[in-house]
Image: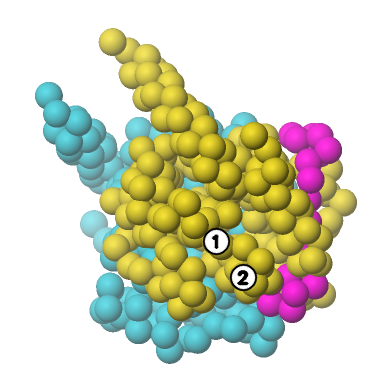
Chain colours: A cyan, B yellow
Amino acid sequence: MSTVTVVEKIMDANDQVANLIREKLTAKKVFAINLMASPGAGKTTFILRTIQELSSRLKIGVIEGDTAPVTIDADKITAAGMPAVQINTGGECHLDAMMMTRGIEQLPLDDLDLIIVENVGNLICPAAFNLGTHANILIASIPEGDDKPYKYPNIYRGLDVLIISKTDLMPYIQFNMDYFKQGVEMLNPGLTSFALSAQTGAGFADWIKWLETNVNKIKRAG
Amino acid sequence: MSTVTVVEKIMDANDQVANLIREKLTAKKVFAINLMASPGAGKTTFILRTIQELSSRLKIGVIEGDTAPVTIDADKITAAGMPAVQINTGGECHLDAMMMTRGIEQLPLDDLDLIIVENVGNLICPAAFNLGTHANILIASIPEGDDKPYKYPNIYRGLDVLIISKTDLMPYIQFNMDYFKQGVEMLNPGLTSFALSAQTGAGFADWIKWLETNVNKIKRAG
């Protein structure tokens, strides 16, 4: 059997497991998002602010993907009063649907409205693995530079939502927003995007509105 | 044959090729560095400034690792007057020694003093693959946050030099340098490090001195 065939079979199996996860979450009326980003794009700070804004209205569980057995991020979520599960990928640069299955088994699904999955910090591997969430979301932070869509096209192609973060740093960084957005539009025309700062809260309201609308859609369906 | 055995055999083969590369470069008196970082840590800007500071005294070739067939980075190097080779990893999240072999075959080794390899933007996969360079260097940029050594320990363990970059952004970002350095020291005691800004040039002189000293050591040897 050639390597390509093995890889194809692995991806097929992953997609099948992902479909089962999505069906289960939808049946339980839990909306789930797969949050991807470079290391240091501010995923955990973004999640903490999202929890803070929604905690009076929604119950939120978090699955933390990490390549090392450290619980820095999961501890921050737990301190914010929400259930968090840490999945150590054992060095792998992405979560996959099997790891996601282990994650949701440890969360109280009947009590949750929303699951936020913090994927491993990486712009390459996570793009290839469907996790069975309802939306793939990328956080692109301003300090990473305006050429990222051109250099990491695969991850942009599969997105449902793009978060442009750390906008508070715009005055101090050379970042051509038009050039960045042209790259995104070429790869994923009409992509929903929110520019915001998790530090100052600027632009956060629109993202929260989108998220809450989608959580409520799942609740009302079926 | 178990998966682990296959992986071990691949890593052994990679190391063998890497050793051949290092012998060849040393014999040709060319010093080579493997530059790793997150996407957006500023690798290309750092390389361009390094070239600018050294171009009157050294001949420098660059190997650009990219996951997509775009030549944004290689074009910038060529525009700076130095030979650049682009290696498209075809989606792989790291360079390996076989790719490196293809890269150095395309460079005029007899005319070069220094080869800078810009690895794929990633903190996970590149750590595992020896490329046959003389030094493994990581650029950690201030906006990525002070917890990165704790979250990506493997890449820190294998370093010869650490570059702490974008220090010009320190006033605008919560970054605890003591916490960061404690993490580094735990993983790689006594690691040589340079804090600098490729934008303003602050701190760049010490890095250039280190690099030039090591280029000259290889030249004088043998």
Q: Are marks 1 and 2 in contact (CB under 8 Å)?
A: yes
Q: Residue A175 falls in which quadrant of the image?
A: bottom right
Residue interval drawn in magenta: B185-202
SS label for mark 2: loop
Identify the residue position indicated by label 1 in the image: B60
Residue A154: x, y in percent? 31, 60
Residue appearing at x 49%, y 74% in the figure: B81
> Are there few (<14), some (14-19), or many (20+) residues within 10 Å of tag 1?
many
Instruction: Find numbered disc 1 in the image and state the secondary structure of the residue it sits on.
Output: strand
Q: Which residue is mark 2?
A: B55
The span from disc 1 to disc 2 (Cα, nearest Å) is: 7 Å
From the image, which quarter does the C terminus of chain B lie in?
top right
Residue found 23% across the figure and 57% down from its top: A222
Task: From this view, report whether residue A124 is shown above or below residue A203.
Answer: above
Q: Is residue B125 above or below residue A140?
A: above
Q: Nearer the viewer, residue A93 or B87?
A: B87
Q: Nearer the viewer, residue A167 or B27?
A: B27
Q: Pointer 2 indicates a residue of which chain?
A: B
Q: In which quadrant is the N terminus of chain B drawn?
A: top left
